[in-house]
Image: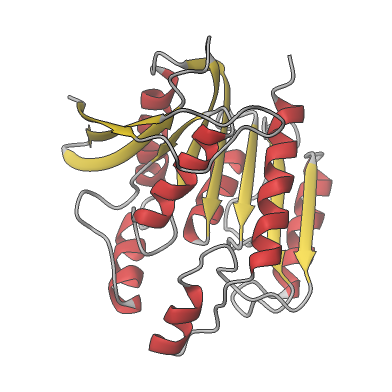
Amino acid sequence: MTHLKHTVLAAGLGLSLAGGPALGELRTETVEYQVNGETFTGYLAWDDEEEGKRPGVLVVHEWWGHNAFAREQAEKLAAAGYTAFALDMYGSGKVADHPNDAKAFMTEATKDLDQVKARFLKAKEILENHDSVDPERIAAQGYCFGGAVVLNMARLGVDLDGVVSYHGALASPIQAEPGKVKAQIQVYTGGADQMVPSEQVAGLVKEMQDAGVDLSLTVFPGVRHSFTNPAADRIAEQFGMPVGYDEAAAQRAWDGTLRFYQRLFAD
């Protein structure tokens, strides 16, 4: 069963459609849902003033879990004219403040590929069934851990129009096969990302080229892991992790993503 908790975001968020008027309000719903007997908590965001059905975008969180950053990305997508669902890959309440907890949550969630796929597909079903969404136009974007998830869903042939990975791991035991990947792919990674070395970048290019996949890849020189998240600098200082926020790279990646979706979903 799926339970919805409804909220209206007030006017004055300062968000606007690219090339369009400022939005009066966004609507959000906290969604509790079940996958194989376990409870998960996701977050829907959309513009209720937008008429007709529009594309839906799944947002997959960093290894910290379904936190405020993931929800903020869903709200930004809603402001751009999409319905977004920030899904939960770990389970309700599993949000980490320490890297050891994040690693434990991620390890448990990814121990079984079928489990990963089931959790992703349930979230996709929820998004597709929302009144505002055209179920034939669905994309997914992920950050860090989430970037790896969306790439692997594309590799597995999940029916997605496109996926976007931000500072996600690019190597995978799953390899793209010719004719299997349905999604067009965009990847944004940092040239100084110690967690995603150049060997992974080169490996992804070869893998996708050999499989005939439509891949666009941007490498930001000197940019570290987790560059889209403003909290990365605090995390680097607190835990000594090789991460860092880069406002310019984050904005370029976001702008590129919106252009990608505009082209992907052009009528």
245 lies above or below 108: below
Between 236 and 183, the one lying in front of the other is 236
Q: Quadrant of residue 238?
A: bottom left
Q: Quadrant of residue 204?
A: bottom right
26 lies above or below 185: above
Q: Quadrant of the N terminus?
A: top left
Left/right of residue 97 with respect to residue 237 in the rendered view: left
Residue found at x 71% / y 47%: 255
Between 9 and 6, the one lying in front of the other is 9
Residue furthest to the front in view is 12
Chosen colour scheme: secondary structure
129 lies above or below 242: above
Q: Quadrant of the C terminus?
A: top right
Left/right of residue 123 with respect to residue 222 in the rendered view: left
Left/right of residue 119 with respect to residue 78 in the rendered view: left
Task: Measuring from the top left, give residue 24's x and y in whole percent.
Answer: 46, 28
Q: Quadrant of residue 102?
A: bottom left
Task: Measuring from the top left, give residue 107's x and y in whole percent.
Answer: 35, 64
Numbered label tally? 0
Task: Measuring from the top left, give residue 168's x and y in whole percent.
Answer: 58, 60
Residue found at x 39% / y 47%: 71
Residue found at x 77% / y 48%: 208
Residue furthest to the top in view is 52
Left/right of residue 97 with respect to residue 187 in the rendered view: left
Task: Measuring from the top left, give residue 85's x and y in whole percent.
Answer: 42, 35
Between 152 and 175, the one lying in front of the other is 152
